[in-house]
Image (spheres, rainbow, N blue to C red):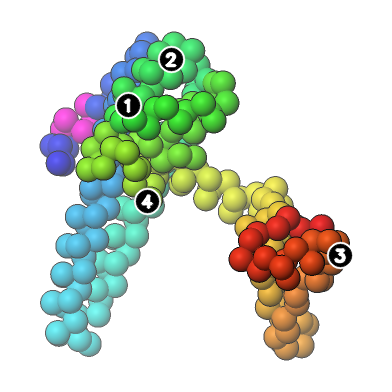
Amino acid sequence: MLIKPEYFRKMVRIWRQPELSPRAKLLISRRLARQYDLIDEIDGLLLSRLIRDLKKGLPFTKSKIDKLEQDYRNQCALRQQARLVIGEWLMSTSTDIEKKIGVSGICDALAVNPVHRRGLTEAKKGRALDYIAFVAGLEDSATHKNAKRQSPVKEGPLFHCVLELMVSFSLEHPELMPDPFAPNGPLYGKPIRMVDGNGQVFTTRPAQTLHDETIVDNLLDHPGKEQPNG
């Protein structure tokens, strides 16, 4: 549910107050981020409907369509910047928040289902907020219909803020990002298409992995059983 613009601006002013408690700031961050998500969804629907109607009058309505699309991109960019601010605050203060309100307090603020809280032992000390909001995607899990199985889609409002931060960082510092095609990477073993200086496209493939003779025998005897690489 969208809140009125004047209330939204008041929440932003409160969020900026330095004396605000970590719990209150975390709750307000979630509400602001949720507002951005809702506006994205509503604006996207309105834009598609307006453009669909304006396309009936092409080519005379092209300038109006271009302006609508540009205005939409500008507004999206502003909301992206706002998410970046929230994401940076979360990542820089997550340890302090955990010290002051504890993991249980974070779970309460992020509406994590009690069933899902049992698996938080994987979170490193001082990084529970990062793990809940981004890694595990447990934000708002208390609203899921099936409490015993979390949603396969990560879509919490704070998750989008951290994701915006991660995308921004990867674009600004590509040299610091790991190679996804390297050994143990998520795309290791996949063929890579590249373009040489003459514009010719060629495909490179990783070298074949040789297995120990015993492992090969086991694979032949039990083809349906997974074996570790040698």
* Residue highlighted by disc 3: 213
Q: Which residues are magenta?
A: 6-10
* Residue highlighted by disc 4: 153
Q: Nearer the viewer, residue 142 or 182?
A: 142
Camera-nearest label, 3 or 4? 3
Give the quarter of the image for residue 112: top left
Q: Nearer the viewer, residue 96 or 102?
A: 102
Is residue 132 rendered to the left or right of residue 141?
right
* Marks 2 and 3, how far apart at CA: 52 Å
Residue type for callout 3: Glu
Q: Residue at x 63, y 61 (%)?
A: 225
Q: From this viewpoint, is residue 96 visible? A: yes
Does the magenta portion include 189? no
In the displayed structure, would residue 195 be above or below residue 84? Answer: below
* Residue highlighted by disc 1: 114
* Residue highlighted by disc 2: 102
Residue type for callout 2: Gly
Q: Secondary structure at mark 2?
A: helix
- Among numbered discs 3 and 4, the one appearing first in the sequence: 4
**Quarter of the N terminus within the rendering:** top left
